[in-house]
Image (spheres, grey):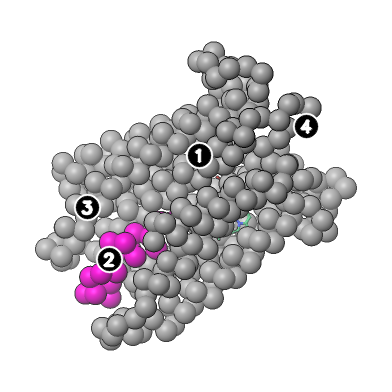
Amino acid sequence: MVLALVGGALLAALITTAYTAVGTIPGLPDPPALVRFGLPAARVVLDLAALATVGMSLLPKLIGFDRPKQTEPIMALARRATVITALLWMLAALVSLVLQAAELSPERSATLELLVDYVANVPAGPGLLASAGAGLACAVLGLLAIRFGESVPAELRTIVALLGLLPIPLTGHATDWRYHDFSMISMELHVIGAAMWTGGLAAVALFVAPRRGLLVEALPRFSKLATTAFIVVGASGLFNGLMTLAITPNVGLLGLFTTGYGQIIVAKVICLVALGAVASQMRFRLLPRIARHQRTALLGWAAAEVAVMGVAYGLGVVLSRAPVVI
Ligand code: HEM
């Protein structure tokens, strides 16, 4: 499961970076390969660690609280894993910060002064710092949850993790637009929907799937969340992608096929269609069988779905840094 997600995302991000000019800035010398490919890799790790933190924080809401004997061992495991993913999130945000500063100033060495300049002058700098802070806050909440259990409410842990997703899109593409308020809200919904959907599925598959009794409870709850996420992620992604193309001079909607940016959007639409097909197989064929306590190939289908989500994440990382006219 973890391999499918990480492998799908890293492969998609690195291959797309290699086939487009993303990571090279016109007028500046090309950054070293470590920066050009290290940066999308670090951003993938950041996104995946954040979605894992969101998914595991959501877990108590999916499995419920009425059977503590069965749920507590799972929750104890998930709380420990959350501290690790949250610290990884923080670390990946800091590494991304160093690499983004190095990308913009290839002639300077990565000193503290360069980082301070970057944070002071480029909006992405404070965005990444805030993201690292959110990772740290989630790790602290996770440690408190290990100590005090569910008296540190799952809602609080989930909300802090979701708020932590907001700073990066706030300081990305969306800020350059004429319709910048709409596009910003839409992008925030996109990343929140994607993290709850992917994180929720990965958490259910890893922690709950082996326990049939709990799965019967958790899967219908997750299925409702997934349906909403499918609509929100699809609508917000299309809105942002198509509007970006439409308002870029000399590009327009035809850019969907004539620019690298547009082709990445098409690839993401294909991912969404594939996700819809796998999700309806789970919803309409597997779920009724699980409700009757019959055996199913749930884990195989979930791994396939998570791998496609990983690819959509990898493409998202490249897209969020890509100029439209690549
Ligand atoms: C119709 C399908 C989709 C379209 C048209 C689409 C479009 C986009 C666009 C335009 C961006 C970049 C926005 C910017 O900063 O300029 C983006 C980023 C992103 N997308 Fe999608 N998307 C789609 C499906 C998905 C799916 C299925 C997922 C995951 C489950 C996903 C996850 C993400 C993430 C996480 C980012 C932000 C990446 C980052 O900044 O690190 N997208 N998407």
> On the image, numbered disc 3 is attached to which residue?
77
Number of other residues with Cα within 10 Å of mark 1, as a class: few under 14, some 14 to 19, many 20 or more = many
Provide residue 232's location: percent of width, then percent of height.
55, 61
Q: Earlier in the sequence, mark 3 or mark 4?
A: 4
Q: CA distance from mark 3 to mark 4?
A: 48 Å
Per the model, the C-alpha gap separating discs 2 and 1 is: 29 Å
User: What amino acid does circle 1 point to?
Assistant: Ala
Front residue (pair 256, 92): 92
What is the span of residues highlighted in magenta in the rendered image? 195-216
Residue at 16%, 41% in the rendered image: 147
Left or right: where does residue 55 sit relative to residue 264? Answer: left
User: Please, what is the dominant secondary structure of the magenta stretch?
Assistant: helix
Q: Which residue is mark 2?
A: 208
Closest to the camera, between mark 2 and mark 1, is 1
Vertical relation: 35 (above or below) 241: above
Disc 4: which residue: 26
Residue with the mark numbered 1: 42
